[in-house]
Image (cartoon, rainbow, N blue to C red):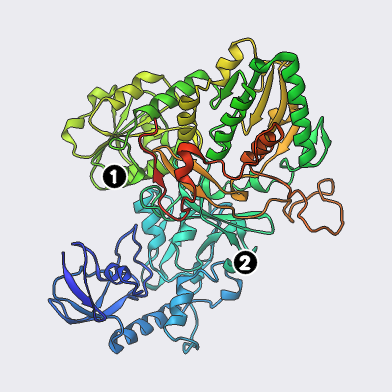
């Protein structure tokens, strides 16, 4: 390991570490724009100048371009280096419009930070500025090209990292332009990352434009609920409205980025007509009254039909806490069925996949990025788990061979400009023995158990694509609790009543089956049929735990308080214009607290903490950490 000195601090760094990274490792921040940990060096902005006093290289050097070597003595505070950085910042600001008061990047802008940190307060340039015309890039991204400092991050991410070909660098020299040949929506499923990766305000989130400044947002570390990968995010809200979602770094999971599905799926959370009012027989009541009514009807049902006719139906999209208490409710009532999955094949495939994973063979997204061979079978990654497709691309860029196995993984779906895959008929046709770090990706939707077992029977790491952010946790609970799939419970012929907890029940449910109570935050046919409707908080309005597809338990924190947003309310949805201390529609509770309320009304003691027993180790899990891999839990 090279040993060097930076600003009188001596340190050892791994081979290949550049001076910028070495300085960051000891808390010294060197201004930079073009360098990014996920993209590497470019040497485009020249803002990271340092002076080397001793060693094999001397003089002013760009710290992002120079690898650390033994004997180097580096100064980041030398007056010559400081003057170089000040000059570069001033050059970059020559054509900048200085429109910080109207720029959505204000408060989280690297150019703003480094300009002020460099001591600049007055513009000396009084000549004519270069100007550009902006482009319409679709409904999600706002383009303001005049703010560009030509760092090339956007083009490098979009074309090299994400594999897009409809956006890039146009022009030359002082007329460089980052955009498309013509106006039009960006086609990449990862285009929203341009807003995060741009160090100025060239690309900003159009869906939240002019809505708030960075310091106005309510924000907290969270986990994306839109697939099973558990990508880390930072949702940002204001006035009870989820305005935007940004990526949060977790190197083992999503790295630095997220997909557009996870970034721009805010509509359901903000919908003014989202269930926010407790109902009993379609009549509005307080939440306490609805819980009382649910317990009363439940007791009447048990007296009439017996506990064997009742099913408690939970869901892979509900938090681990809610699913745990669903099992406690089943035990208390001695209900005939506890269900976590809809159909028997879905349940069997998910349970089998989870049972085959262990501490040695499960693959994270980082394992995928580092693989030298990837086999994809039984899934369409771009539809089911886009960030996993992006991880496969990084492996392919590093030289890995990629194989599409079987008809369900067609080359058209596998490629999508992300990576070049070779088509094979079966897993036996993949040269796994020639690889040092092979990874097999397998879906759980199609043929059944044979392909899943085949994937587990080879010397390779496994990544299963599951359905739902907590499908892994539900599989563990289903095996532990002896749960049935809902289709099995329905086929038994004894089912007469259901308590549905964020459950996606079939629309053709027999009319003689009562849905006595349904708790959910999304509108569905289940809620329309429910005798007692119990609205609950969505994931950004609560704290909870998801277990992702590799068995990584991750905590997400509450971002905003529940309640009607102040924007978009039609006259019929607008609350009464009365002074009140609580937000309209704000008396919602997480699903686990709804179940806890039922349990307490049925005779249990007050429940303060749902994670008990062998799950107690997840109490206090750090939401800003990397999560905890569950092992030995099967």
Q: Position of residue 536 (x, y in %)?
A: 67, 41
Q: Is residue 108 above or below residue 417?
A: below
**Which x, y percent locates residue 254?**
40, 49
State the CA–CA distance, disc 2 to disc 1: 39 Å
* Residue 44 as seen in the image, left or right of residue 271: left
Viewer-nearest residue: 471 or 435: 471
Disc 2 is placed on an element classified as helix
Residue at 69 percent across and 28 percent down: it is 526
Viewer-closest of 527 and 398:
527
Q: Tell me where residue 22 sits by quadrant.
A: bottom left
- Residue holding disc 1: 395
Label 2 sits on residue: 216
Q: For the residue carrying disc 1, how many other residues have a C-alpha within 10 Å: few (<14), some (14-19), or many (20+)?
A: many
Q: Picture coordinates of residue 166 (x, y %)?
A: 43, 50
Q: Secondary structure at mark 1?
A: helix
Q: In front: 401, or 180?
A: 401
List x then y, in percent, for residue 185.
53, 50
- At 50% from the left and 65% from the top, the residue drawn is 202
What residue appears at the point 46 percent right and 53 percent down from the top-left corner? 622
Q: Give the quarter of the figure containing the C terminus.
A: top left
Residue placed furthest toward the top: 493
Occupied quadrant, residue 390 = top left
Using a 10 Å C-alpha cutoff, classify the residue at mark 2 as few (fewer than 14 neighbours), some (14 to 19) or many (20 or more): few
């Amino acid at each position: 390991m090279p040993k060097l000195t930076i600003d009188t601090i001596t340190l050892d760094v791994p081979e290949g570490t550049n001076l910028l990274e070495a300085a960051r490792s000891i808390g010294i921040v060197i201004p930079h724009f073009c360098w990014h940990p996920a993209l590497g060096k470019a040497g485009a902005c020249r803002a990271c100048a340092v002076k080397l006093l001793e060693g094999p290289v001397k003089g002013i050097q760009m710290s992002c371009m120079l690898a650390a070597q033994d004997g180097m003595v580096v100064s980041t505070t030398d007056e010559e280096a400081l003057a170089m950085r000040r000059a570069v910042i001033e050059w970059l600001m020559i054509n900048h419009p200085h429109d910080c008061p109207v720029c959505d990047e204000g408060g989280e802008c690297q150019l703003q930070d480094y300009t002020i940190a460099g001591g600049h307060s007055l513009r000396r340039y009084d000549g004519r500025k270069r100007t550009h015309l902006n482009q319409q890039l679709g409904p999600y991204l706002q383009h303001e090209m005049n703010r560009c400092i030509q760092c090339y991050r956007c083009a490098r991410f979009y074309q090299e990292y994400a594999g897009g070909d409809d956006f890039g660098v146009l022009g030359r020299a002082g007329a460089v332009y980052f955009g498309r040949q013509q106006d039009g929506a960006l086609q990449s499923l990862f285009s929203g990352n341009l807003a995060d990766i741009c160090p100025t305000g060239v690309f900003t989130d159009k869906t939240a434009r002019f809505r708030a400044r960075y310091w106005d947002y309510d924000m907290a570390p969270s986990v994306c609920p839109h697939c099973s990968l558990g990508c880390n995010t930072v949702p940002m809200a204001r006035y009870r409205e989820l305005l935007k979602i940004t990526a949060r770094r977790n190197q083992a999971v999503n790295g630095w980025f997220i997909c557009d599905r996870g970034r721009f799926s805010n509509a359901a959370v903000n919908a003014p007509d989202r269930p926010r009012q407790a109902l009993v027989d379609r009549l509005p009541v307080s939440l306490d009254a609805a819980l009382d009514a649910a317990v009363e009807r439940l007791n009447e049902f048990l007296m009439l039909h017996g506990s064997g006719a009742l099913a408690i139906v939970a869901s892979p999209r509900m938090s681990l806490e809610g699913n745990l208490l669903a099992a406690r409710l089943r035990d208390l009532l001695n209900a005939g069925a506890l269900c976590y999955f809809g159909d028997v094949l879905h349940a069997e495939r998910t349970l089998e996949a989870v049972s085959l994973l262990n501490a040695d063979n499960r693959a994270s997204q980082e394992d995928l990025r580092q693989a030298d061979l990837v086999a994809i079978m039984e899934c369409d990654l771009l539809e089911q788990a886009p960030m996993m497709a992006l991880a496969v691309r990084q492996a392919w860029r590093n030289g890995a061979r990629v194989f599409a196995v079987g008809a369900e993984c067609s080359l058209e779906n596998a490629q999508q400009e992300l990576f070049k895959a070779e088509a094979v008929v079966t897993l036996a046709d993949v040269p796994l023995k020639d690889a040092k770090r092979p990874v097999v990706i397998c879906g759980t939707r199609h043929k059944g158990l044979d392909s899943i077992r085949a994937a587990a029977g080879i010397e390779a790491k496994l990544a299963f694509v599951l359905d739902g952010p907590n499908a892994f946790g539900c599989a563990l609970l289903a095996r532990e609790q002896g749960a049935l799939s809902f289709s099995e419970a329905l086929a038994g012929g004894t089912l007469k009543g259901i308590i549905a907890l964020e459950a996606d029940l079939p629309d053709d449910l027999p009319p003689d089956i009562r849905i006595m109570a349904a708790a959910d935050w999304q509108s569905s046919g289940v809620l329309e049929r429910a005798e007692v409707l119990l609205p609950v908080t969505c994931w950004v309005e609560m704290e909870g735990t998801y277990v992702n597809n590799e068995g990584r338990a991750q905590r997400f924190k509450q971002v905003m308080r529940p309640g009607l947003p102040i924007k978009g309310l039609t006259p019929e949805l607008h609350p009464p214009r009365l002074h009140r201390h609580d937000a309209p529609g704000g008396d919602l509770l997480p699903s686990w607290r709804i179940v806890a309320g039922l349990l307490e009304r049925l005779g249990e003691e007050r429940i303060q903490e749902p994670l008990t027993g062998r799950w107690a180790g997840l109490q206090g899990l750090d939401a800003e950490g990397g999560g905890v891999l569950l092992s030995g839990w099967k």
